[in-house]
Image (tube, rainbow, N blue to C red):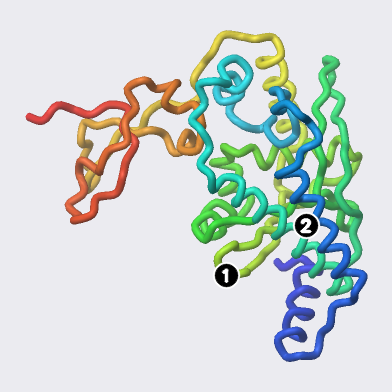
Amino acid sequence: MNHPAELSLHSYLRGAVDGKSTMSQEVIDQVAEDIKVALHKQFNPEEEEPRKFKLRMSNIGRPTCQLWFQKNDPDNAEPKPTSFKVNMIMGDIVEAVFKGLLRASGTTFEDNDKVTLDLPKGGKVSGEYDMILDDKVDDVKSASPWSYENKFADFNTLNAGDSFGYVSQLVGYAAAAGKDIGGWWVVNKANGNFKYVSAEEANGKEVLENIEDTYDYIDKDKPFERCFEPVPETYFKKPSGNMKLSSNCRFCDYRYKCWPTLQALPSRVSKAKDKPIVEYVSVAEAA
């Protein structure tokens, strides 16, 4: 089912394509201001020193093994590629433009604001939500074509493999703001398609308990424990004997530290001329 604002936005854009819809100077100025703020945030941060590790809404839902490394062994992270900054600013620009389109379509919402979630045992987790629409907290996400179609297919699909912690982030924002849980406005970075993915099925109580558990684990410096195990490689449903890195670990900056034997190699089972690169935790000896 489409979100009412989604339908309004499609109607506005249809008019723009047909040369009938316009955008006010006020909306244009707001988009420009939001992008200016984003550029300063990415390239001219207020902090002179790199930001120290802290549990925030943006990371509280990530795997605890990753958070453990970020806190206790930050110097062994894989270096970010130079494209990282470009990707981050693209996400900020997409959010700014998408909000401008919502405004131009006549959709009214409360803009981003900073909030703090007070945990039962005294901990605090802070962050800044993207918007409140219809008294529900929503987030704007830019996504690759694959992520748009597969990761953000629906709530249950996202929740089943949420290694970036999007569900915890959204639920945490809603609880801190005293609002209902909304969902995600997802924009395909490649072609401009967009959709609304509702999180109404989220179990808020359970998610908040997980947030509390994560905070407790990291705050008390409990011993390191891996969250995921290697995955057996198969070829036509037959095991090759090789073990691959879990897909949940694919974007972790500490995967090589966590798995010292990890190596990126051309697929050992593919028959293609240009074999895809696979990250192997272990490779079976040839018979």
- In this rendering, the answer to whether 120 lies above or below 95 is above
Image quadrant where one finds the C terminus = top left
Residue under pointer 2:
35
* Residue under label 1: 191
Q: Observer-nearest residue: 41 or 17? A: 41
Q: Position of residue 234 (x, y in %)?
A: 26, 41
Give residue 257's mark.
none
Residue at figure coordinates x 80%, y 55% from the top left: 36
Separation of marks 1 and 2 at Cα, in angstroms: 20 Å
Q: Nearer the viewer, residue 140 or 206?
A: 140
Residue placed at 66% from the left, 32% from the top? 61
Question: Tags 1 and 2 in contact by the CB under 8 Å rule?
Answer: no
109 sits to left or right of 16: right
Q: Quadrant of the N terminus?
A: bottom right
Left or right of 264: which side holds 70? right
Looking at the rendered image, the disc whose residue lies closer to the viewer, 1 or 2, is 2
Q: Amino acid at mark 2?
A: Ile
**Placement of 236 over or under 4, stated as above or below:** above
Which residue is rendered at x = 77% and y = 86% of the image? 15
Judged left or right of residue 245, residue 225 is right
Q: How many marks?
A: 2
Displayed quadrant of residue 16: bottom right
Q: Secondary structure at mark 2?
A: helix
Residue with the most extreme left position = 287
Q: Position of residue 218 (x, y in %)?
A: 67, 16
| Element at label 1 | loop
Q: Is residue 11 above or below residue 193?
A: below
